[in-house]
Amino acid sequence: MSIKQNPGRTGRRHDGPLPDFRNLGVVLRVLVGVNGLGLIAVLARSGQWSSLGGALMDMAMCVEPPLIVAVAALFLLQPVLARMPAPAGWVGVGAVALAAAALFNTLLAPLDVGDLASWLGWTALLVVAVRAYFRYLAAVYAPSLAEARLLALTARIRPHFLFNSLNGVLGILRSDPRRAEAALEELADLFRALMRENRDLVPLADEIALCERYLALEHLRLGPRLSVRWDCAPDVGTAQVPPLFLQPLVENAVYHGIEPGAGPGEVAIAIRRHGPELRIEIVNPLQGGHSHPGGNRMAVDNIRERLMLFFDLEAGLETEQADGLHRVRIRLPYRTAT
């Protein structure tokens, strides 16, 4: 369960927030959970192994059709449910599940699948169990644990970067005072972004602008040794992404791929939309034994954890080292503010 299933309504996190029924992880958990409870009920009621197969077939016939219809209906109704308070939203979820159960009980009545009251009673119990499960996940992830970890993960920047940036400004203060003033403004913008709470998703355009400010400061120190190649599709700027997830990876690429080397190097950043997914790739040279010791995994592991907190199974991060290059590949759902 992602901690920001409904990003615009932070007040619901303390009272069993309604999950996002368009989230792949949520859908899988509902399907597996309901079928698991059905299996437990069959095992508890079946007295003989010889009749177990028939009992499982009967359970599948009674559970799967209304379950699939209910999940599909919740997928379609997610925008409506997201605007409702959590208690009213769960009432809506229960109403959808009960309606699906009543519909299929009527359709399967000629097969003698049980009376309507039994179907509705079991469906109500399943809805209560699903709600209890997601309340448990909410208690585990939010607010005291997940938000504290999220804020800690987004508040990291290497101290050496601050000192190097200030030294770079001092180095050009007399020769190019306008550039020095602009660099201080860029540094202030960068730290202003770091000081925000950073709980909600933000437009990717903001993250790209933040990276450009960071890279402009690194250019003061590294000069022609650092070159950056952006390859961004025109339609990616409005995508909603976790705050401060791109800058640490770009900083990682500069810190480990450019700074230790003696010659020039390039950091390549490609951002493309592939259907329902946003894909990002960051490539930097490998410096072999000249790379900074440690720290390379920290940023990657932090971003991977934050993607999990925001998007659950719909996002992922992979790394690869081949042909003298280090690659970070990110996939996450393409979502806009609307």
Image (cartoon, helix red, strand yellow):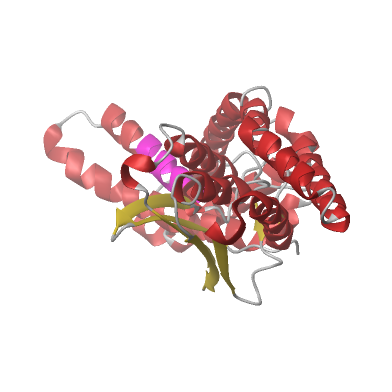
User: Is 302 on the left or on the right of 33, as rendered?
Assistant: right
Q: Check the picture and name the quadrant holding the N terminus.
A: top right
Q: Is residue 37 magenta?
A: yes
Q: Residue at x 25, y 43 (%)?
A: 55
Position in image of residue 242 (x %, y %): 64, 48
Position in image of residue 299 (x %, y %): 51, 39
Relative to the observer, which residue lies in front, 21 or 126?
21
Q: Can the viewer see residue 199 in this picture?
A: no
User: Is 46 on the left or on the right of 259, as rendered?
Assistant: left
Q: Please, what is the dominant secondary structure of the magenta stretch? A: helix
Relative to the observer, which residue lies in front, 336 or 320?
320
User: Is 272 on the left or on the right of 172, as rendered?
Assistant: left
Q: Check the picture and name the quadrant holding the C terminus.
A: bottom right
Relative to the observer, which residue lies in front, 76 or 169?
169
Q: Residue at x 53, y 55 (%)?
A: 71
Is 72 above or below relative to 116? Answer: below
Which segment is the magenta one?
26-38
Q: Residue at x 66, y 46 (%)?
A: 244
